[in-house]
Amino acid sequence: MGSFEIKPNIYWVGARDWNVRFFHGPAFSTHRGTTYNCYLIKDEIITLVDTVHEPFTEEMLNNLQEVINVKDIKQIVMNHIEPDHSGALPKLVQLVGQDVKIICSGKGKEAIEEHYGSGYNFQVVKTGDTISTGKNSLTFIEASMLHWPDSMFTYIKEEALLLPNDAFGQHLCVSELFDDKVDAGHLMGEAQKYYANILTPFSQLIIKKIQEIVSMDIKIDMIAPSHGIIWRQDPMKIVNAYLDWAKSEGKDKIVVVYETMWESTEQLAKAIVEGIMESGVSVSLHRMCQSDRNDLLQEVLDAKGLIVGSATINNSILPNLAPFLEELEVLKFKNKVGAAFGSHGWAGGAVEKIERFFNVSKIKIVKEGFKIKYKPTKEDLLNAKAFGKIIAEEVKKG
Ligand code: FEO
């Protein structure tokens, strides 16, 4: 028994991907797996909302078959066409019949045709359009660029149920897919990691979209996203968390990320951390080669300050720091202060390179980079500690 009822005659019929450890190719680490959620509305007009990643098609079909005869599906709402939600669509359409109605946004239609070819029976919808399935009505809310141009949400008024696809989701695979059944720390951590790594660039759109939904004055007592758990106990908890993360204000906390060649930069990093701790500001320290880039980006969202250090090689940074710094550039976190540090030999360059990344990422440099030659002396370490204190004071100013 894989399917389960989330509301009267509305069923989860998705798939669990327990073992996936990277998502979006190698771009996103998924330590706790993920799920591909899709929902069946068993009404007069049997309707499926979203599908699953193609390798999980059989699992979805088995779950559907538990509730209905798959051939009885009359329409499929595609909230989003990324392959983790649309991969099973061609096989499903083949089984149900080519005339099954595909309901999606205008951009969704384009994306389906560009992924899977033409010949589908589309009904294009826009914000405010409503269709009846019998006892239930489905209202659509376009959510372009949250996070693809085609994205939209489906709202079922009779059950106060919002199906927002990727929004409010998390890469988390558990046996009981409800917010009241999982560890709250794991849940909010995974939701925050998802936001930090995928949604941060769209923060202004997220604030506007949430305001738009609030202004529609609709009741929401369950949010069922397309990844991870379903918010039934406290759906507003994740909505409020999104509003908070979208502001990107962060806590009085500094994240120190470094890479070292002969431990000199590492000694500086530890001295800087000591200075921050003495100032009473929370801090976490991460050597890049032993850290997960996506976890670090989640920490950056959660913090006000970021300090990055590198030894110099060929007048630049140690290369394994580059992907992290490049992500800062594209994610564009707001309201962060930063500083750089590092040890060099006969010529520098790493600190300046980090500062260039900070500038393009709009991270405000609050103190000129801290640089030493070769190995740190006792005085250098004291100065590094003082450097940490200065950044901590800047973070406290907020
Ligand atoms: Fe879960 Fe944008 O796909």
Image: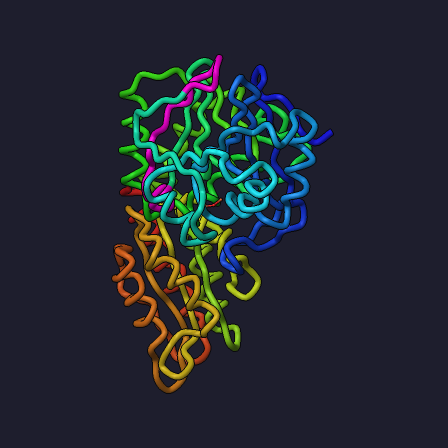
139 part of magenta stretch: yes
Quarter of the image for residue 58 reads top right
Residue 82 image offset from top left, x and y in percent = 46, 48
Q: Quadrant of the C terminus?
A: top left
Residue 84 image offset from top left, x and y in percent = 53, 47
Q: Quadrant of the N terminus?
A: top right
Q: Residue furthest right?
A: 1
50 part of magenta stretch: no
- Residue 179 left/right relative to 202: right
Task: Residue at 43% x, 52% y: name it.
Answer: 255
Task: Residue at 36% x, 41% y: name it.
Answer: 146
Residue span colored magenta: 132-150
What secondary structure characterizes most of the magenta part? loop
Quick one: 306 or 154, which is closer to the camera? Answer: 154
Q: Compared to 307, does 220 lie above or below?
A: above
Residue 69 image offset from top left, x and y in percent = 65, 28
Task: Residue at 39% x, 22% y: name it.
Answer: 131
Quick one: 318 or 95, which is closer to the camera? Answer: 95
Task: Residue at 39% x, 63% y: name it.
Answer: 325
Residue 277 seen anywhere in this rendered image of the structure:
no
